[in-house]
Amino acid sequence: MPTRIPILRIANCCAVILLLAHLTACNDSEVVSYSIPKEVDRAAPATLPAGHPPAGVGSTAATTAMPALPGMQEIADAAPDIHFTLPNGWVDAGSTGMRKANLRVDDSDGSAEITALTFPGDVGGTLANINRWCGQVGLETINETALQEISAPITIANHGGLYVRLEGKEKSILAGILPFHGSTWFFKMLGDTATVQRNEPAMKTFLNSIQIEDAHH
């Protein structure tokens, strides 16, 4: 007499078979891995008063800015706040994206952007960063000896830093580089040479006024 297999048992067996097939497919898929590059953060530029072009427009900033690497935005968000005195004639557009400060100045000769950013570590070293800036203003790269000619010690937020002056034919840079408890702050003015030169006293006043919230003191 043939053995009768209950319909319910048949259904259960089918379910088990389907489950095993599904698990096998999942295990097979885990063997292959894919690396998807993280999209660079493209935060909207700060809103400036009417007549001001967006950050980077009309300058080399748009094409030579330091790339935002994965995790940089989170580090910038976690960085301490800064306080400073805004020089006369400068416009404060507030912090945006990775910028802890986003300022601008215009005059009859042109315009300049002033930014404050912080990155972990030394971001490749002082000389490497200054040589990147040289490219932004059309200058040749420099060596350690020449570095001493275009820089000088400066105190920012009660910490020792470096003041940098790069004068190009059309564009120039004034900057303060500040190592700060395992990170590096960059306070940089980039713009038309005549405007940057005229605003050098204001830039130094700005750097002297900066205070960074310091949990280590």
Image (spheres, helix red, strand yellow):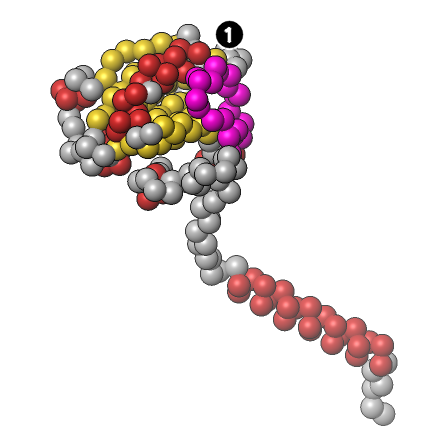
Relative image position of residue 101 (x, y in whole percent)? 47, 26
Near mark 1 (Cα within 10 A), the count class, few <14, some 14-19 or many ≥20, is few
* 87 in the magenta segment: yes
Q: In this orientation, does residue 75 appear?
A: no
Magenta stretch bounds: 77-97
Image coordinates for residue 59, horizontal then vertical, percent: 32, 40
Side (left or right) of 118 relative to 164: right
**Residue at left 79%, top 73%?**
12
In the rendered view, would you say 212 is above or below 14?
A: above
Q: Nearer the viewer, residue 104 or 75?
A: 104
* Badge 1 element: loop
- Tell me the residue that label 1 is attached to: 217
Which x, y percent locates residue 105? 40, 27
Instruction: Name the image quarter holding residue 151.
Output: top left
Q: Residue at x 85, y 81 (%)?
A: 7
User: Can residue 88 be seen at all in this image of the molecule?
Assistant: yes
Q: Residue furthest bottom?
A: 1
The amino acid on which the numbered mark 1 sits, given as a three-letter code, is His
Instruction: Residue 27: name its quadrant.
Output: bottom right
In the depicted structure, whether residue 138 falls above or below residue 213: below
Nearer the observer, 83 or 14: 83
Specify the farthest residue to the front: 108
